[in-house]
Image (tube, rainbow, N blue to C red):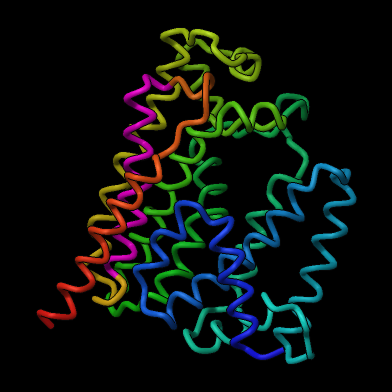
Amino acid sequence: MTTEAAYAACRAIARTQAKNFYYAFVALPAGKRDAICAVYAFMRQADDLSDDESLSIAQRRIALDAWVGEWHQALNGNPTNDPVFVALLDAQRRFAIPPQLLDQLIQGTATDLEPSSINDGRFAAYATFADLYRYCYLVASVVGLVCIRIFGYLDPRAEKLAEETGIAFQLTNILRDVREDAQRGRLYLPLEDLERCGVTASSITAISSGQQLTPEQRQVLAIQAERAGQFYKSADALLPLISPDSRAALWVLVTIYHRLLRHIEQRNFDVFSARIRVPAYEKLTILGCGLFKTLAQAVWA
């Protein structure tokens, strides 16, 4: 398989499944866009294996371990016909992405397959925000640390800022997906926050569509939104530190995610009646602004 064919396959995966991410990808130069699509397709493969509810948890672990083994063989120079592996190997070499970061991406997707040590294992949960931060780091911050290798940066401060930007994104995802996660036996609201607000975990997981939230339940969600808002400040600081030709793409992505958080807040945290999204017309408007920024940068450079 040629590298170009492999990248084409990854672009197709990103175009059909990346949703918020793909709008940002469009604003990147072609070579960087291909690399980001390869990273996304790699994460998508790992996520799909971890989330395949047609298999038991044990079967998913076996399937993921086998896939990881194939990836490591490809990374060590063994031939592969997997288009995602072919594309990612090229991207990893061109942009000097540390292999350990890619392993951490996989570790993040496998986190939900680990048995819970709290709540008698009834559902995946996190006792403290520090525990949740570590989870967010693995599933989102590591993505940011990979992406800035592709975007390009010189100032080492960019790494911590990318980490914190990932935390902002994942906290936003957690708020949006509370209902869906609860249905799958997962709760990503720190139990210490529930206890502080006088809310039980079971009262959150039992909320049905259209049910009115209590003020205490809304307060738990508002705590996460406040944290996310603070971490979005790191995204603002990160923007000027990455290469000029990638700033518009990061701006698009940050703006879409921050807008999603605002929509959740405007709905008074009712994430149970319907899934909250940034409408396509808003995303296209944001993308248009991002592309204008790219054009302006090229003209004024």
Q: Residue at x 75, y 45 (%)?
A: 114
Report x, y in % for residue 215.
41, 9
Farthest residue, direction left: 300
Q: Is residue 215 above or below residue 122?
A: above
Q: Which quadrant is the C terminus positioned in? A: bottom left
Whether 264 is among the magenta residues is yes
Magenta span main SS = helix
Q: Residue at x 42, y 66 (%)?
A: 25
Q: Residue at x 44, y 83 (%)?
A: 31
Q: Is residue 11 above or below residue 163?
A: below
Left or right side of 278 for 124: right
Q: Is residue 229 above or below residue 77?
A: above
Q: Which residues are magenta?
A: 247-269
Report x, y in % for residue 20.
45, 52
Q: Residue at x 70, y 62 (%)?
A: 45
Q: Is residue 189 above or below residue 34?
A: above
Left or right side of 6 for 190: left
